[in-house]
Image (cartoon, rainbow, N blue to C red):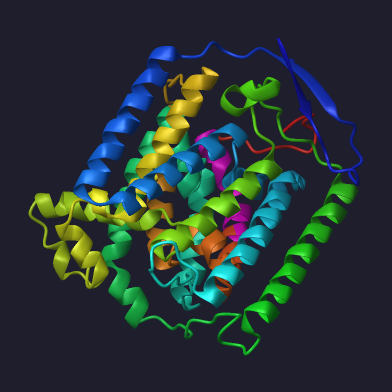
Amino acid sequence: MAQTTLNTPANWDHKSTTVVTKLSPVQKPLVAAGILATIILLIAIVNMANWTQGILFIIGLALGATLLHARFGFTSAFRRLVSVGNVQGLQAHMLMLAIATTLFAIILSTGFSFTGIKPAGYVSPVGASVIFGAFIFGIGMQLGNGCASGTLYSVGGGSSSMVLTLISFIAGSVLGAYHFTFWMEDMPKLQPISLAESTGLGYFGAWLVQMAMFAAIYWITVQIAKKKNPPMMKPLPTTSGWKKIFRGSWPLFAAAIILAVLNALTLAIRGNPWGITSAFALWGGKALSIAGVDVASWGYFQGVNGVALTQTVLADSTSVMNFGIMLGAFISAAFQGTFKPKKIKPGVAGAAIIGGLMMGYGARLAFGCNIGAYFGGIASFSLHGWVWMVMAMLGTFLALYIRPLFGLKNPKSTDSIC
């Protein structure tokens, strides 16, 4: 037996909750299969691409393990905040963004790189595409029960419904790529705005501004928690000592720090922050190309994206990181004994498909998902990252009224634990 202690911020009007849980046995055959698949794929990546890709694959493994062990959510954090005022997830986001912003400021201002590639953040224009794309992404992630990173680590962790979400996510990304030229050329938008480079603040000034914004949001979350006295997050099965690294649950705030550091490492290695959904458009585009569709003529698949169509997916850094995330989550779930796919209910299946389509389409329009646009965009000092956050939150609010139509439950203020 193991004890799981749920700790709450000191300024919350809650007592810590101790729940006794029993860990499932390690699924040794699955652990062995996951490690073997990791070794084989790493060798293939290094041989067909290079060691830079191999290192990014390893970072993906670490990302998947971190997300799985902490059940670090973007979708659930937004849903719990909007529905019952639970702010634990958003507070972890603020810590993650504060650390990433600090590291990004150093890397971007100095040009620091491990590979000689000049680092560049994700700075994209704010326009109709970002506003609409982020909004429908917010709805989609609540219907699909996972964002981009959540979809990958949940698939790796054994969630059957998330397989449907991933497939439809890819389809939606391809549709967004097909309409990409319309949204970019025919719809209104501003020039890309960097708080560091477009405002005259410089990276230090922009860092101060964003730190003040993170602190303000954190303070607001504390006030929300005091006022609403929300139910707490469900404690996860865990253990103690060194075994917790492989078998137990990791604190949200520890995961936030790890994710921020891994994103900064990604920036310093490949020259761009962590992203996920561009690979979905690539995978779908390759599938259509094999089927005889001339996707190379689409506006989205011009330039770098077009080159990727002609190469192996193992040469695409986003793809290899995605593979790493799924494998890292798979191995972690097997260590925890939780890789147990379940039968999908019809309502959940329908929501997963619709949600995936909306996320895929929205991500292409909004220059990324919760990782590329929200996490990477804000850490890169891009205004579009902040707009994405607001619009996705509004989409989440609307989605709370849609979820019950598919039999999906929302957290309630009367719940003891949400």
The image quadrant of residue 57 is: top left
Q: Is residue 349 visible?
A: no
Quadrant of the snapshot with the N terminus: top right
The picture places residue 260, in percent across and down from the top left corner, at 59, 54
Q: Viewer-proximal residue, 105 or 98?
A: 105
Residue range (magenta): 393-407
Quadrant of the snapshot with the C terminus: top right
Q: Residue at x 69, y 71 (%)?
A: 210
Instruction: Classify 128 as above or below 308.
Output: below
Looking at the image, residue 189 sits to the left or right of residue 208; the answer is left
Instruction: Classify 160 as above or below 266.
Output: above
Q: Viewer-proximal residue, 212 or 264?
A: 264
The picture places residue 331, in percent across and down from the top left corner, at 44, 27
Q: Is residue 212 visible?
A: yes
The image quadrant of residue 25 is: top right
The picture places residue 390, in percent across and down from the top left corner, at 62, 65
Total numbered labels: 0
Prevalent SS, magenta region:
helix
The image quadrant of residue 360 is: bottom left
Looking at the image, residue 371 sits to the left or right of residue 4; the answer is left
Instruction: Classify 200 as above or below 39.
Output: below
Residue extending furthest left?
A: 292
Instruction: Classify 203 as above or below 132.
Output: below
The picture places residue 383, in percent across and down from the top left corner, at 57, 75
Q: Residue at x 66, y 86 (%)?
A: 201
Q: Is residue 351 magenta?
A: no
Q: Viewer-proximal residue, 408 or 326?
A: 326
Q: Viewer-proximal residue, 115 or 186?
A: 115
Q: Is residue 398 magenta?
A: yes
